[in-house]
Image (spheres, rainbow, N blue to C red):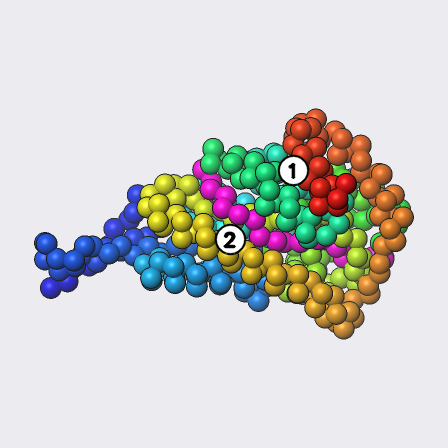
Amino acid sequence: PSLLVVSACGGGGSATQEAGGQAGGAPAKQTRTLKAGIGLNEDHPQGQGLKKFAELVEQKSGGSMKVQTYFAAQLGDDLKMTNALKSGTQEITIPSTSPLTSMVKEFGVFDYPFVFNNEQEADAVLDGPVGKKLLDMLPQQGLIGLTYWENGFRNLTNSKRPVAAPEDFQGLKIRTLQSKVHIEAFSALGANPTPMPFSEVFSALEGKTVDGQENPLPTIESNKFYEVQKYLSLTNHVYTPFVFLVSKKFWDGLTPDEQKILQEASIEAGKFQREKNREQNKQSLENLKSKGIEVNEVKPEDREKMQEIVKPVLDKFSKDLGEALVKEMYDEVNKVRGK
Ligand code: TK8
């Protein structure tokens, strides 16, 4: 007679042990169920990536590890889910790095506007020593950072006017990420930044508590911000990474093999996710135009002016976040540029 023992596993995650019959029978096989939640929708590249990750984990573990997926902030916003990982009530989340600056301030270097010109430069920094250094700061927060996925280059939408030159930011009430660098950079540009969790953005735009917001194009499309915004300005002002997080309490209870499965699957699914995101970024621009949002470009010289305006803010933050770290990031970018 087979015996089913359900036990709460020490570090969170539910574990089911199926005893292989009587004592002396086949070794007990443990099944683990991992809760993974994200802020974006199932059809967004982040959602597609998470589903890919779940498939890979199931495959690689021969079915002994199962990932339950939750989309669209069903389990809460980025910070709430990250805190659930810390306390061990959720196993996986993939937040933007920006709200994590309240835990690891050094993630603020990824909030510097106008650092990367393209995704390849971002990949070099994230997959290189700078990215690694930041992941290494997570365990002391009760978090394991396995790899980076892509949120992407952010663009501004608003209900007032096209934003093409720095003066167009004047007085615009913009929802920003919960990051000091973002808040101060938008203030320097003359905007009125209002930080809030992503899950509150649509209703804030709809109810006109804010005039605008900024996010990558796939998100603007997937979350239907075009329904409540008139203008889309292709500012490409900053690149936001997603960081793949696992609860440390949970991680510490895994076997090395199980850890390896999660590590490999997160990286493999991440490659898939980055590719999907880059395709979708192009597609979303077309889709958004056809939805009737008014799109404008930003001239390189106006981007440079914006860059000049935020520079003192960044110089100030570099003192706090570590000038060596900031320099390492820019050096890495210059390497890709062949400088
Ligand atoms: C989704 C967020 C979102 C981010 C934001 O959970 O908050 O604007 O860009 O995509 O991480």
Q: Is residue 272 magenta?
A: no
Q: Position of residue 94 (x, y in %)?
A: 53, 51
* Closer to us: 217 or 214: 217
Front disc: 2 or 1: 2
The answer to whether residue 307 is seen in the rendering is yes
In the visual, does 66 lie left or right of 266?
left
Q: Residue at x 56, y 49 (%)?
A: 148
Q: Position of residue 211 (x, y in %)?
A: 77, 54
Highlighted range, magenta: 142-162
Q: Amino acid at mark 2?
A: Ile
Identify residue for label 1. Answer: 108
**Picture quadrant where residue 294 is located:** bottom right
Identify residue for label 2. Answer: 267
Q: Residues within 10 Å of mark 2 (few under 14, many from 20)?
A: some
Q: Earlier in the sequence, mark 2 or mark 1?
A: 1
Q: Amino acid at mark 1?
A: Gly
Q: So how many labels did they put on this image?
A: 2
* Closer to us: 90 or 298: 298
